[in-house]
Image (cartoon, helix red, strand yellow):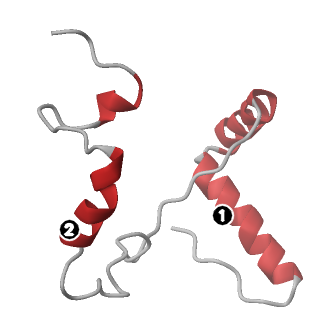
């Protein structure tokens, strides 16, 4: 068996691809009888929501060093900064655990 590469590597093994002319028929046949619930989304449903952001290596090194100096996590530094921005605008600060 040859190595599967590209987008094919994301499909389940043994699953056959559908010819282009049968795609519309299959989509109609696979549609469930009832529409999905608008509350079916799984993201951001818990009390604590995980987030991520991108930062340059140079800025990460600065933030990392600051966190070490302060003895806190980068997450805590981020929350402190966001809380300060809210407070500067006259809004309640954030809860930092």
Residue 39 in picture, x, y percent from top left: 35, 86
Label 2 environment density (alpha carbons within 10 Å; few <14, some 14–19, many ≥20): few
Give the residue displayed 46% in from the left and 68% down from the top. 49
- Quarter of the image with the N terminus is top left
Vertical arrangement, residue 19 with respect to residue 80, above or below: above
Q: Name the residue beneath numbered marker 1.
A: 79
Would you place residue 15 above or below residue 86 in this image? above
Frontmost residue, 54 versus 90: 54
Foreground residue, 60 or 14? 14
**Which element is circle 2 on?**
helix
Q: Which residue is at 26% across, 71% downward?
A: 28
List x then y, in percent, for residue 25.
26, 64
Q: Which residue reaches farthest front? A: 21
Sequence-first disc among 1 and 2: 2
Q: In the displayed structure, does residue 13 sit left or right of residue 76?
A: left
Q: Position of residue 5 (x, y in %)?
A: 36, 19
Identify the element where label 1 is drawn. helix
């Amino acid at each position: 068996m040859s190595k599967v590469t590209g987008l094919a590597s994301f499909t389940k093994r043994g699953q056959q691809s559908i010819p282009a002319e049968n795609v519309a028929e299959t989509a109609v046949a696979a549609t469930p009888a009832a529409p999905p619930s608008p509350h079916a989304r799984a993201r951001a449903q818990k009390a604590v929501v995980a987030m991520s952001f991108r930062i340059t290596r140079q800025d990460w090194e600065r933030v990392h060093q600051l966190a070490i100096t302060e003895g806190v996590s980068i997450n805590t530094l981020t929350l402190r900064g966001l809380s300060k921005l809210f407070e500067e605008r006259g809004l309640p600060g954030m809860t930092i655990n």
